[in-house]
Image (cartoon, helix red, strand yellow):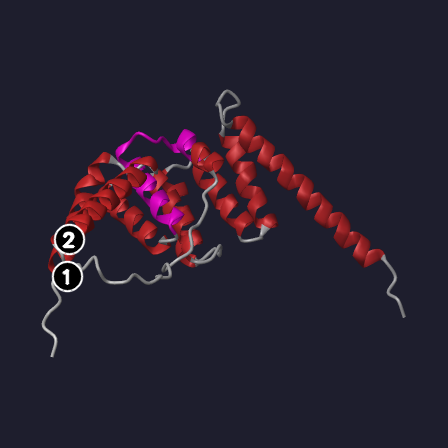
Amino acid sequence: MAGPRVVPAEARLMGWVMLIAIAALASAVLWRIGLPRGLWTFVGSALMLGATGYALQGNPTLAGHPVKADADPIPLDPDLIALRDAMTGRFTGDGAYLIAADGMTRIGATGSAVQWILAGINKYPQSYALWTGLGMSMIAHDGNRMSPTAAFAFQQAARLAPQQPAPPFFTGLAYVQAGEFAKARPYWAKAVALTPKTMSYYPELAGRLALLDRFLSALELQRRAKVGSPEKS
């Protein structure tokens, strides 16, 4: 019987070099997507746990094999992120949780995104920004469907900040993403009505409402044409 295989020192050293490089790359990526500074302790602990596991079990001479990702990445519209930040604020304590949730959503971890926002709500229960973000995260997690949980989150956001345009705007956006365009219209109209024309994002909100109205008008014309056309025998 063959004895235990001895891993050369050079191979182990190379494995550690690769591990350090991966950790550095992961840190750079997390910084680039905007992970708040306050969450770096969590990230460092995860990287340290991985290093410990490698030290105990790692064998750089073993052949690798492809691993399928648990979830597909979800692209986020940077214009919508910028619009949300302009409406609710970015460099705030509650905003940090939204940034973390964005990072989780981008890699397809929608459940983790929801958990990040729930953690933020636990700390900032009166944050309409976080309740609005919870609604959007639930929409993404539920496959672009307005679930009762998402609807409750949007309602809570509107209750906390009835004069803020963000809750009705993102409620309408959720309906647009779900393909329920007519339901989106009153929410977007309310968001525009709540926004002073001097605000930098007013043209964006008004423009989206105008485009939605044109789309709804086209759908109505199509419906009328279909109803009015004689059926072929």
> Relative to 44, is 125 on the left or the right?
right
- Taking the spot 21% from the left edge, 48% from the top edge, the residue there is 19
- Quadrant holding the C terminus: bottom right
- Taking the spot 58% from the left edge, 36% from the top edge, the residue there is 208
- Quadrant holding the N terminus: bottom left
> Relative to 189, is 35 on the left or the right?
left
Tell me the tag on residue 40.
none
The answer to if 218 sits in the magenta stretch is no
Label the magenta part by its dominant secondary structure.
helix
Tell me the tag on residue 57.
1
Comes first in the chain, label 1 or label 2: 2
Which of these two is toward me, 116 or 31?
Answer: 31
> Relative to 222, is 229 on the left or the right?
right
Q: Amino acid at mark 2?
A: Arg
Furthest residue in direction bottom, as rendered: 1
Circles 1 and 2: CB distance less than 8 Å? no
Q: Kindly state the secondary structure of the residue where label 1 is placed.
A: helix
Compared to 107, does 188 lie above or below?
A: above
- Segment tinted magenta in the rendering: 84-107
Q: Kindly state the secondary structure of the residue where label 2 is placed.
A: helix
Tell me the tag on residue 12.
2
In the rendered image, residue 36, in percent from the top left (x then y), is placed at: 26, 36
In the rendered image, residue 45, in percent from the top left (x then y), is placed at: 16, 47
Which mark is in front, 1 or 2? 2
> Relative to 206, is 153 on the left or the right?
left
